[in-house]
Amino acid sequence: MLNVVVNGLWGPRGESVPAIAERWAGTLTALGEIDGPTFGQWHEAGDDLPSDPVLEPSAAALAEYIERKNTGPDLDVAGYTSSLWARNPGTAHVSLAVHAGSTSRYAVNSVALAFRSREVDETAQVIRRAPEILRLLAEIWEFDTGQVYDRPQYRAVAERFDLANSDPRCGRAVFLSAGRAALAPGSLPGTYVRTAHGGLVIDLTYGGTKTAETAAVIGANERLREAGALEKLPTPFDRDRF
């Protein structure tokens, strides 16, 4: 069963609803350019039925949706949470969740794109391009760390290094913000792709042409940790990136 996630995390960064909606709209456009059939139609989080109305992928429509989903006091501290899903014929079921705009010094902001399917497997081109998707999400959302992972490897890494969910780690691909990238060793078994804002994606799948075995993923985590590239942000957070 396919269960692959592309995610990213960052610390406190105050952002308005229009600013978050602009990033959302840019994300949907970029994903559609990578794989139109998979990312062709997005629905609001809810009943998760194909008959649900399709959300217009514009900044204005997304801003209205974010405001409608987030009510109550102190949103400038708590941040704004919203999610969308798509399930198109012959493709994986995808969901995209964002928590952004939080200025809390104890809670991270995040974006997560999940692929799940019983029919589509990891040979699908969109899954092979997951490290590329990690790069574009990192550039749009300007996060601190991110990764591509499947559930068994995520659990293996968490258990090996005793990690909480918000702790930086490397999956089959990893994104490192500029400060972290400066510490990364240059000889891990994968491709290195520089990103906007000085970041770095290290892809252990070599562009989807190889399988990143669990031992290789754990080994990459060990070397990145030894180099200091996967240190936690200091808590309470005093910045959004390392």
Image (cartoon, grey):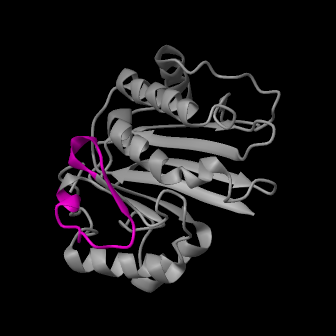
Taking the view exactly as shown, the residue that stands out farthest to the top is: 60
**What residue sits 40% from the left and 30% below the top?**
23
34 left or right of 38? left
Q: Is residue 198 magenta?
A: yes
Taking the view exactly as shown, the residue that stands out farthest to the front is: 209
118 left or right of 149? right
Q: Where is 114 relative to 48, above or below?
A: below
**Is residue 164 shown to the viewer in this render?**
yes
Range covered by the magenta-colored residues: 179-199
Residue 52, position in %: x, y? 77, 27
The residue nearer to you, when weighing 199 against 70, is 199
Q: Is residue 119 magenta?
A: no
**What residue sits 54% from the left and 77% below the top?**
213
Q: Quadrant of the C terminus?
A: bottom left
Residue 34, position in %: x, y? 55, 36
Q: Where is 225 relative to 201, above or below?
A: below
Residue 210, position in %: x, y? 54, 67
Q: Quadrant of the N terminus?
A: bottom right
12 left or right of 151? left
**Is residue 74 shown to the viewer in this render?**
no
Q: Where is 195 relative to 175, above or below?
A: above
Question: How many numbered circles are shown?
Answer: 0
**What residue sits 56% from the left and 70% below the top?**
211
The residue nearer to you, when weighing 111 against 203, is 203
77 left or right of 113? left
Residue 174, position in %: x, y? 39, 61
The residue nearer to you, when weighing 183 against 238, is 183
The residue nearer to you, when weighing 210 against 99, is 210
